[in-house]
Amino acid sequence: MRTAVFKNIKYGTGTDLVWGQEGDFAVRENKTVKVFKNNEQVFQFQKDETITNLYGGAVLSVVTEKGIAIHSWDTYK
């Protein structure tokens, strides 16, 4: 049985990592969320309040102390 060889790629010092449906992923670093496509950072945004959790899937969900925000993987809105 052969195993896949993974390249080392720098994702930063994130505390959470979630995946989208098309290989996109997001990393949380304190109050900042960085979004990657094809292993390249394409967008980042910062929340005023502390981010407590991230959820991936069809949309990117960001849970903060005050509520939940749902973002599109394509438009980030």
Image: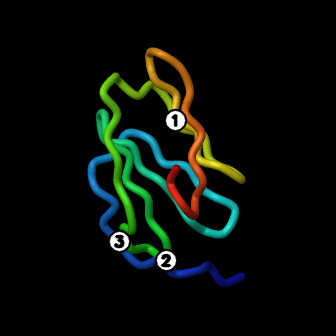
Amino acid beneath label 1:
Val
Would residue 69 be found to the left or right of residue 66 on screen?
right
Q: Residue at x 55, y 33 (%)?
A: 69
Amino acid beneath label 3:
Ile
Label 2, on which residue? Answer: 38
Residue 1 on image: x %, y %: 72, 82
Q: Residue at x 31, y 40 (%)?
A: 46
User: Secondary structure under badge 2?
Assistant: loop
- For the residues marked 1 and 3, what is the alpha-carbon distance in whole angstroms? 24 Å
Q: Is residue 62 above or below residue 10?
A: above
Residue 32 on image: x %, y %: 32, 42
Q: Residues within 10 Å of mark 3 (few under 14, many from 20)?
A: few
Residue 44: name its quadrant: bottom left
Label 1, on which residue? Answer: 62
Frontmost of labels 1 and 3 is 1
Residue 26 on image: x %, y %: 47, 53
Q: Which mark is residue 9?
A: 3
Q: Residue furthest top?
A: 66
Q: Nearer the viewer, residue 15 or 34?
A: 34
